[in-house]
Image (cartoon, coloured by chain):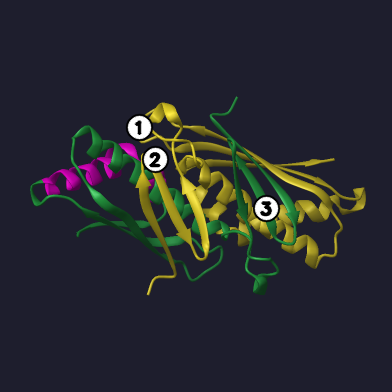
Chain colours: A yellow, B green
Amino acid sequence: MADHRVITRFEGGMRFNSQVDNHTIIIDTPENDGGTNMGPRPKKLMLSSLAGCTGIDVVGILNKMRVEFSDFSMDIEADLSDESPKTYTDVKITYIIKVKEEDQEKVKKAVMLSKEKYCGVSAMFSQFADMDYEILFL
Amino acid sequence: MADHRVITRFEGGMRFNSQVDNHTIIIDTPENDGGTNMGPRPKKLMLSSLAGCTGIDVVGILNKMRVEFSDFSMDIEADLSDESPKTYTDVKITYIIKVKEEDQEKVKKAVMLSKEKYCGVSAMFSQFADMDYEILFL
Protein backbone atom coordinates (compact mmCIF):
# COMPACT_ATOMS: atom_id res chain seq x y z
CA MET A 1 0.00 0.00 0.00
CA ALA A 2 1.28 3.46 -0.88
CA ASP A 3 2.21 5.92 1.88
CA HIS A 4 -0.13 8.61 0.56
CA ARG A 5 -3.17 8.35 -1.67
CA VAL A 6 -5.38 11.09 -3.10
CA ILE A 7 -8.47 10.60 -5.32
CA THR A 8 -9.51 13.47 -7.59
CA ARG A 9 -12.77 13.52 -9.55
CA PHE A 10 -13.76 15.62 -12.57
CA GLU A 11 -16.98 17.52 -11.89
CA GLY A 12 -17.57 19.30 -15.24
CA GLY A 13 -16.18 22.41 -16.89
CA MET A 14 -12.57 22.45 -15.70
CA ARG A 15 -13.45 21.69 -12.09
CA PHE A 16 -11.97 18.88 -10.02
CA ASN A 17 -12.79 17.66 -6.51
CA SER A 18 -9.75 16.27 -4.72
CA GLN A 19 -10.24 14.16 -1.60
CA VAL A 20 -7.32 14.51 0.81
CA ASP A 21 -8.13 12.29 3.78
CA ASN A 22 -11.47 13.69 4.98
CA HIS A 23 -10.98 17.08 3.30
CA THR A 24 -12.19 18.34 -0.07
CA ILE A 25 -10.10 20.63 -2.24
CA ILE A 26 -11.75 22.18 -5.31
CA ILE A 27 -9.44 22.99 -8.22
CA ASP A 28 -10.63 25.02 -11.19
CA THR A 29 -9.52 27.54 -13.80
CA PRO A 30 -10.76 31.10 -14.25
CA GLU A 31 -13.53 31.81 -16.76
CA ASN A 32 -11.06 32.89 -19.46
CA ASP A 33 -9.59 29.37 -19.42
CA GLY A 34 -12.91 27.55 -19.68
CA GLY A 35 -13.54 27.14 -15.95
CA THR A 36 -15.85 28.74 -13.40
CA ASN A 37 -13.20 29.87 -10.89
CA MET A 38 -14.64 27.76 -8.04
CA GLY A 39 -11.16 26.98 -6.66
CA PRO A 40 -7.48 27.77 -7.15
CA ARG A 41 -5.47 26.78 -10.18
CA PRO A 42 -3.43 23.67 -9.46
CA LYS A 43 0.13 25.00 -9.72
CA LYS A 44 -0.31 27.72 -7.10
CA LEU A 45 -1.55 25.06 -4.66
CA MET A 46 2.05 23.87 -4.54
CA LEU A 47 2.96 27.21 -2.95
CA SER A 48 0.26 26.73 -0.29
CA SER A 49 1.69 23.29 0.35
CA LEU A 50 5.17 24.76 0.75
CA ALA A 51 3.95 27.46 3.14
CA GLY A 52 1.97 24.99 5.23
CA CYS A 53 4.87 22.57 5.48
CA THR A 54 7.51 25.03 6.63
CA GLY A 55 4.98 27.01 8.70
CA ILE A 56 3.97 23.93 10.71
CA ASP A 57 7.68 23.17 11.29
CA VAL A 58 8.41 26.70 12.51
CA VAL A 59 5.40 26.76 14.87
CA GLY A 60 6.28 23.32 16.25
CA ILE A 61 9.92 24.29 16.86
CA LEU A 62 9.05 27.67 18.43
CA ASN A 63 6.54 25.93 20.70
CA LYS A 64 9.21 23.45 21.80
CA MET A 65 11.62 26.33 22.44
CA ARG A 66 8.84 28.09 24.43
CA VAL A 67 9.18 31.17 22.23
CA GLU A 68 6.10 33.42 22.25
CA PHE A 69 5.20 34.83 18.86
CA SER A 70 2.34 36.54 17.05
CA ASP A 71 1.35 37.86 13.60
CA PHE A 72 3.08 34.99 11.83
CA SER A 73 2.60 34.77 8.07
CA MET A 74 4.56 33.74 5.00
CA ASP A 75 4.70 35.57 1.69
CA ILE A 76 5.81 33.26 -1.13
CA GLU A 77 6.82 34.68 -4.49
CA ALA A 78 7.66 32.35 -7.36
CA ASP A 79 8.85 32.82 -10.92
CA LEU A 80 8.02 30.48 -13.79
CA SER A 81 10.14 29.24 -16.66
CA ASP A 82 9.47 30.81 -20.05
CA GLU A 83 9.18 27.52 -21.90
CA SER A 84 6.39 24.96 -21.56
CA PRO A 85 5.83 22.94 -19.39
CA LYS A 86 6.12 25.96 -17.11
CA THR A 87 7.88 25.11 -13.87
CA TYR A 88 8.90 27.21 -10.87
CA THR A 89 12.49 28.39 -11.28
CA ASP A 90 12.93 30.80 -8.35
CA VAL A 91 10.98 30.69 -5.10
CA LYS A 92 11.34 33.16 -2.25
CA ILE A 93 9.73 32.56 1.14
CA THR A 94 9.51 35.58 3.43
CA TYR A 95 8.60 34.66 7.01
CA ILE A 96 6.92 37.61 8.76
CA ILE A 97 6.70 37.28 12.54
CA LYS A 98 6.60 39.26 15.78
CA VAL A 99 8.80 38.05 18.67
CA LYS A 100 10.77 39.68 21.45
CA GLU A 101 14.11 40.92 20.16
CA GLU A 102 16.02 38.36 22.26
CA ASP A 103 14.12 35.54 20.52
CA GLN A 104 14.99 36.53 16.96
CA GLU A 105 17.92 34.10 16.83
CA LYS A 106 15.59 31.26 17.81
CA VAL A 107 13.31 32.10 14.88
CA LYS A 108 16.31 32.03 12.55
CA LYS A 109 17.22 28.62 13.94
CA ALA A 110 13.66 27.32 13.48
CA VAL A 111 13.60 28.45 9.85
CA MET A 112 17.00 26.87 9.23
CA LEU A 113 15.93 23.56 10.82
CA SER A 114 12.77 23.47 8.70
CA LYS A 115 14.76 24.16 5.54
CA GLU A 116 17.57 21.68 6.20
CA LYS A 117 16.03 18.89 8.28
CA TYR A 118 12.26 18.76 8.45
CA CYS A 119 10.31 20.22 5.54
CA GLY A 120 9.91 17.60 2.83
CA VAL A 121 8.05 20.01 0.54
CA SER A 122 10.93 22.46 0.74
CA ALA A 123 13.39 19.63 -0.04
CA MET A 124 11.33 18.66 -3.11
CA PHE A 125 11.17 22.28 -4.31
CA SER A 126 14.95 22.57 -3.99
CA GLN A 127 15.26 19.84 -6.65
CA PHE A 128 13.79 22.09 -9.35
CA ALA A 129 13.98 25.71 -8.10
CA ASP A 130 16.44 28.12 -6.53
CA MET A 131 15.12 28.68 -3.02
CA ASP A 132 15.53 31.84 -1.01
CA TYR A 133 14.52 32.19 2.67
CA GLU A 134 14.14 35.55 4.42
CA ILE A 135 12.76 36.61 7.78
CA LEU A 136 11.05 39.94 8.42
CA PHE A 137 10.66 40.79 12.12
CA LEU A 138 7.69 43.04 12.92
CA MET B 1 6.96 41.38 -9.70
CA ALA B 2 6.89 37.63 -9.28
CA ASP B 3 4.76 35.47 -11.58
CA HIS B 4 2.88 33.85 -8.69
CA ARG B 5 2.35 35.02 -5.13
CA VAL B 6 0.62 33.28 -2.23
CA ILE B 7 0.16 34.69 1.30
CA THR B 8 -0.36 32.22 4.15
CA ARG B 9 -1.32 33.25 7.69
CA PHE B 10 -1.01 31.32 10.95
CA GLU B 11 -4.37 31.09 12.71
CA GLY B 12 -3.46 29.25 15.93
CA GLY B 13 -2.81 25.61 16.86
CA MET B 14 -1.18 24.22 13.71
CA ARG B 15 -3.68 25.85 11.35
CA PHE B 16 -2.78 28.05 8.39
CA ASN B 17 -4.98 30.04 6.01
CA SER B 18 -3.48 30.28 2.54
CA GLN B 19 -4.82 32.86 0.10
CA VAL B 20 -4.53 31.68 -3.51
CA ASP B 21 -5.96 34.49 -5.64
CA ASN B 22 -9.51 34.85 -4.29
CA HIS B 23 -9.58 31.35 -2.76
CA THR B 24 -8.84 30.21 0.78
CA ILE B 25 -7.09 26.93 1.53
CA ILE B 26 -6.94 25.76 5.16
CA ILE B 27 -3.96 23.60 6.10
CA ASP B 28 -3.78 21.83 9.45
CA THR B 29 -2.50 18.70 11.16
CA PRO B 30 -4.55 15.97 12.83
CA GLU B 31 -5.14 16.12 16.59
CA ASN B 32 -2.30 13.68 17.33
CA ASP B 33 0.15 16.21 15.83
CA GLY B 34 -1.11 19.20 17.78
CA GLY B 35 -3.66 20.42 15.24
CA THR B 36 -7.43 20.38 14.96
CA ASN B 37 -7.72 18.65 11.56
CA MET B 38 -9.53 21.58 9.93
CA GLY B 39 -7.76 21.02 6.60
CA PRO B 40 -5.37 18.67 4.82
CA ARG B 41 -1.74 18.23 5.74
CA PRO B 42 0.50 20.24 3.43
CA LYS B 43 2.44 17.51 1.65
CA LYS B 44 -0.62 15.68 0.33
CA LEU B 45 -1.82 18.96 -1.20
CA MET B 46 1.00 18.51 -3.71
CA LEU B 47 -0.80 15.39 -4.96
CA SER B 48 -4.03 17.40 -5.41
CA SER B 49 -2.02 19.96 -7.33
CA LEU B 50 -0.59 17.23 -9.57
CA ALA B 51 -4.02 15.72 -10.23
CA GLY B 52 -5.57 19.09 -11.00
CA CYS B 53 -2.78 20.06 -13.38
CA THR B 54 -2.78 16.92 -15.50
CA GLY B 55 -6.57 16.56 -15.22
CA ILE B 56 -7.18 20.05 -16.63
CA ASP B 57 -4.77 19.24 -19.49
CA VAL B 58 -6.53 15.99 -20.33
CA VAL B 59 -10.00 17.58 -20.26
CA GLY B 60 -8.82 20.49 -22.41
CA ILE B 61 -7.19 18.19 -24.97
CA LEU B 62 -10.17 15.79 -25.12
CA ASN B 63 -12.51 18.76 -25.59
CA LYS B 64 -10.37 20.03 -28.49
CA MET B 65 -10.37 16.52 -30.02
CA ARG B 66 -14.18 16.44 -29.56
CA VAL B 67 -13.92 13.20 -27.58
CA GLU B 68 -16.93 12.52 -25.35
CA PHE B 69 -16.03 11.10 -21.94
CA SER B 70 -17.54 10.52 -18.51
CA ASP B 71 -16.62 9.21 -15.05
CA PHE B 72 -13.15 10.75 -15.19
CA SER B 73 -11.06 10.56 -12.03
CA MET B 74 -7.42 10.17 -11.03
CA ASP B 75 -6.07 7.95 -8.29
CA ILE B 76 -2.61 9.08 -7.17
CA GLU B 77 -0.47 6.86 -4.97
CA ALA B 78 2.85 8.13 -3.66
CA ASP B 79 5.63 6.64 -1.57
CA LEU B 80 7.84 8.63 0.78
CA SER B 81 11.55 8.38 1.49
CA ASP B 82 12.53 6.72 4.76
CA GLU B 83 14.89 9.49 5.84
CA SER B 84 13.92 13.02 6.90
CA PRO B 85 13.06 15.38 5.25
CA LYS B 86 10.57 12.93 3.79
CA THR B 87 10.09 13.46 0.08
CA TYR B 88 8.03 11.62 -2.53
CA THR B 89 10.14 8.98 -4.24
CA ASP B 90 7.60 7.11 -6.40
CA VAL B 91 4.36 8.55 -7.70
CA LYS B 92 1.79 6.65 -9.73
CA ILE B 93 -1.13 8.40 -11.46
CA THR B 94 -3.96 6.17 -12.60
CA TYR B 95 -6.39 7.94 -14.94
CA ILE B 96 -9.84 6.30 -14.79
CA ILE B 97 -12.18 7.29 -17.62
CA LYS B 98 -15.08 6.08 -19.74
CA VAL B 99 -14.91 6.67 -23.50
CA LYS B 100 -16.01 4.82 -26.63
CA GLU B 101 -13.53 2.10 -27.50
CA GLU B 102 -12.47 3.90 -30.70
CA ASP B 103 -11.47 6.96 -28.63
CA GLN B 104 -9.09 5.13 -26.26
CA GLU B 105 -6.05 6.03 -28.37
CA LYS B 106 -6.99 9.71 -28.12
CA VAL B 107 -7.06 9.47 -24.33
CA LYS B 108 -3.59 7.90 -24.39
CA LYS B 109 -2.40 10.76 -26.58
CA ALA B 110 -3.93 13.36 -24.21
CA VAL B 111 -2.19 11.80 -21.20
CA MET B 112 1.10 11.67 -23.09
CA LEU B 113 0.82 15.32 -24.16
CA SER B 114 0.08 16.40 -20.58
CA LYS B 115 3.06 14.45 -19.28
CA GLU B 116 5.55 15.58 -21.90
CA LYS B 117 4.43 19.04 -23.01
CA TYR B 118 1.89 20.78 -20.83
CA CYS B 119 1.79 19.84 -17.15
CA GLY B 120 4.31 21.92 -15.22
CA VAL B 121 3.47 20.20 -11.92
CA SER B 122 4.20 16.82 -13.48
CA ALA B 123 7.51 18.19 -14.84
CA MET B 124 8.46 19.44 -11.36
CA PHE B 125 7.56 16.10 -9.76
CA SER B 126 9.74 14.28 -12.30
CA GLN B 127 12.75 16.16 -10.88
CA PHE B 128 12.49 14.35 -7.52
CA ALA B 129 10.30 11.25 -8.04
CA ASP B 130 9.94 8.30 -10.40
CA MET B 131 6.67 8.91 -12.18
CA ASP B 132 4.34 6.23 -13.50
CA TYR B 133 1.26 6.94 -15.66
CA GLU B 134 -1.51 4.38 -16.24
CA ILE B 135 -4.94 4.55 -17.81
CA LEU B 136 -7.89 2.42 -16.72
CA PHE B 137 -10.79 2.41 -19.18
CA LEU B 138 -14.19 1.80 -17.60
Q: Position of residue B96 (x, y in %)?
A: 26, 57
Q: Which residue is mark 1?
A: A84
- Decide if residue B127 is on the left or right side of residue A108: left
Please state which of residues B112 and A100 is positioned toward the viewer in this rendering. B112
* Cα–Cα span, label 3 and label 1: 31 Å
Q: Pointers 3 and 1 in contact (CB under 8 A)?
A: no
Query: Which span is picked out in magenta?
Result: B103-125
Tell me, yes or no, whether the highlighted magenta stretch contains residue A25: no
Name the image quarter holding residue B89: bottom left
Q: Pointers 2 and 1 in contact (CB under 8 A)?
A: yes
Q: Chain of mark 2?
A: B
Judge the density around disc 1: few (<14), some (14-19), many (≥20) Cα neighbours within 10 Å.
few
Q: Which mark is residue B16?
A: 3
Q: Which residue is mark 2?
A: B120
* Cα–Cα span, label 2 and label 1: 7 Å
Mark 1: which amino acid?
A: Ser
Same subunit, tags 3 and 2: yes
Element type at marker 1?
A: loop
Q: Position of residue B102 (x, y in %)?
A: 8, 47
Same subunit, tags 3 and 1: no
Q: Chain of mark 1?
A: A
Q: Which mark is residue A132?
A: none
Q: Position of residue B44 (x, y in %)?
A: 50, 59
Same subunit, tags 2 and 1: no
Quadrant where the image shows the C terminus of chain A: top right
